[in-house]
Image (tube, grey):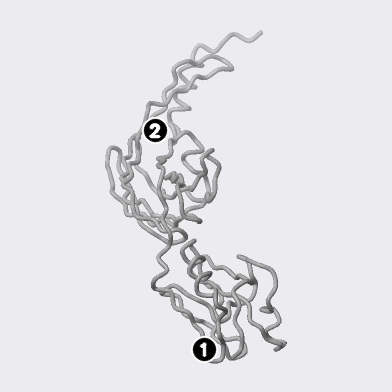
Amino acid sequence: MDAPNPDFAAVTRRFIMEMPIAAHFGFDLTAIRPGYLEVTQPYRRELSFRDGMFQAGAVGTASVELENAGAEPWRGLALAYHWLDELGNAIDWDGLRTPVGRLEPGERALLTAEVRAPMPPGRHRLAFDLVLEGRYWLSEIGNSMLEADVEVGPRDATTAVAHLPAQVEPAADWHELVRAAHEEGFAAVGGAIESRERELRAYRPAGGRNPSFAEPLVCPSLLPPLEPNCEVEGLPAWRPDDDEPFMYDGRLLLRPR
């Protein structure tokens, strides 16, 4: 049987502690023996958060203060976030990114992060995290997320513009349903058209809501800065071209005059 290596503990400690991740997180090895390592990490608070005003489906801002509590400079990190339910399950895992820039050990930075709020309005849990793109979220390797319960309000629908030309007439409940959809968080809302035109057959009244509707929204109601960006049979229409949430609702009925 081979004799034990008297330098095992020293060699193992040097190998582990020279890893960049060990310096970043302040790891320490409190027990080393063949087949067993005990790694400890001191309590770290690297994020602080000041609540912003969030509207469902819209992009708001939050002030987040970072501190590099490790021993090595930060390079290539981005601040992002997750929206979680009351059990900690992800509602939206891949939040918008805010570049952190280089941060030296002990240095702090105050960032204004863009945050797209979830839908519908209500109480949600926001968890800020740091990510090294293409490699890992820091929460996956031991760093604590900064979590806060946030009240998400209805989206402001007062600036919505209904693009209704003179040749169509909305049903009596059209404006009420459209407003409710905007307040739920949708920036673009469209619906059905009573027409026998072949080009409008996709818009014939049927069914209910369809957030993955494949056709442009015809005669839509849009929140600024959105504007119609195409036409269907001479009618103003909007084809999704960014990350703004939209909704097609077959209950929203337009009739030709």
For residue 104, say whether it is visible.
Answer: yes
Tag 2 secondary structure? helix
Q: Residue furthest front?
A: 172
Q: Position of residue 169 (x, y in %)?
A: 56, 85
Give me the residue at 33% from left, 45% from top. Answer: 49
Q: On the rendered structure, is 54 left or right of 188?
A: left
Q: Nearer the viewer, residue 179 or 46?
A: 179
Q: Nearer the viewer, residue 100 or 92?
A: 92
Q: Position of residue 87 (x, y in %)?
A: 54, 38
Query: Badge 2 is on which residue?
Result: 23
Q: On the rendered structure, is 203 left or right of 114?
A: right
Asked where in the image residue 55 lies, by quadrant, the reply is bottom left
Query: Badge 1 is on which residue?
Result: 165
Tag 1 secondary structure? loop
Q: Is residue 55 above or below residue 31?
A: below
Which badge, 2 or 1, comes first in the chain's sequence? 2
Q: Amino acid at mark 1?
A: Pro
**The N terminus: image quadrant:** top right
Q: Nearer the viewer, residue 99 or 89?
A: 89
Q: Position of residue 12 (x, y in %)?
A: 49, 22
Q: Amino acid at mark 2?
A: Ala
Q: How would you rate the neighbour count of disc 1 (Cα within 10 Å): few for under 14, some for 14-19, many for 20 or more?
A: few
| Mark 2 touches mark 1? (CB < 8 Å) | no
Give me the residue at 44% from left, 25% from top. Answer: 14
Q: Is residue 86 above or below residue 209?
A: above
**The C terminus: image quadrant:** bottom right
Asked where in the image residue 13 lies, by quadrant, the reply is top left
